[in-house]
Image (cartoon, rainbow, N blue to C red):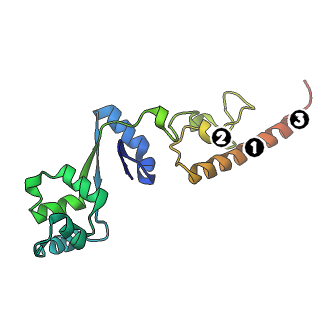
């Protein structure tokens, strides 16, 4: 999804840690997008090479490649106007459009953020090794969580896991002889 301030969506969320690390390291990073994934490059070149018959470039791209809206806007952002008549170059760019990312949005705008308790500090029941009896779940964990229903499901599932482990830990502790 393209927004006024950048891009977002499940693929971006899945790559967010890698993208954020690359931006921190290099000051920017590039995603290469295939805007026409249902067509191979050769077929796309053939389709775009068809005569326009007086149609506008926008209409030609829409009819021959299904490119309009955000896809067309991204193409215009990347290719200079003088290159838009070169259908081989247009096709190549549609199949491998470079999208330069310069920064993540501020944490105040985040739906979910990275950071939290590192997974390697927890046992299989999500208990902190350094603080027995302290269990962590959901967004307490350092994970690149998906958003929406996936996030809720993952939080609930980790909560069930930690809750069961906590109950087992308390039962085991209560069975131990007093000292």
Q: Secondary structure at mark 1?
A: helix
Q: Which residue is mark 3?
A: 174
Relative depth, front residue between 143 and 78: 78
Q: Residues within 10 Å of mark 2 (few under 14, many from 20)?
A: many
Mark 3–mark 1 Cα distance, whole angstroms, equals 16 Å
**Quadrant of the drawing holding the C terminus:** top right
Q: Residue at x 12, y 65 (%)?
A: 87
Relative depth, front residue between 17 and 56: 56
Give coordinates of residue 124: x percent, y percent. 66, 43
Give coordinates of residue 52: x percent, y percent. 12, 73
Q: Which residue is mark 2?
A: 137
Give coordinates of residue 102: x percent, y percent. 30, 37
Dot 3 or dot 1, earlier in sequence: 1
Of circles 3 and 1, the one toward us is 1
Query: Quick check: 50 above or below 25?
Result: below
Residue contact at pointers 1 and 2, CB within 8 angstroms: yes
Dot 2 or dot 3, earlier in sequence: 2
Q: Which residue is mark 1?
A: 163
Relative depth, front residue between 72 and 38: 72
Residue pushed farthest top? Answer: 179
Mark 2–mark 3 Cα distance, whole angstroms, equals 23 Å
Residue 95 visible somewhere in the drawing: yes
Mark 1–mark 2 Cα distance, whole angstroms, equals 9 Å
Q: Secondary structure at mark 2?
A: loop
Query: Quick check: 133 above or below 29?
Result: above
| Res 176 → quadrant | top right
């Amino acid at each position: 999804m393209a927004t006024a301030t950048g891009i977002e969506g499940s693929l971006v969320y899945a790559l967010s840690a890698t993208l954020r690390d690359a931006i921190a390291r290099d000051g920017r990073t590039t995603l290469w997008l295939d805007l026409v994934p249902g067509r191979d490059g050769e077929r796309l070149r053939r389709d775009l090479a068809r005569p326009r018959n007086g149609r506008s470039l926008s209409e030609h791209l829409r009819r021959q490649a299904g490119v309009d809206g955000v896809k067309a806007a991204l193409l215009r952002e990347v290719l200079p106007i003088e290159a838009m008549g070169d259908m081989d170059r247009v096709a190549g760019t549609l199949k491998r459009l470079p999208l330069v990312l310069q920064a993540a949005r501020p944490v105040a705008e985040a739906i979910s953020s990275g950071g939290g308790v590192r997974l390697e500090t927890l046992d299989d029941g999500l208990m902190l090794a350094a603080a027995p009896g302290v269990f962590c779940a959901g967004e307490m964990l350092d994970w690149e969580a998906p958003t929406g229903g996936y996030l809720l499901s993952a939080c609930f599932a980790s909560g069930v896991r930690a809750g069961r482990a906590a109950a087992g830990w308390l039962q085991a502790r209560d069975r131990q002889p007093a000292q």
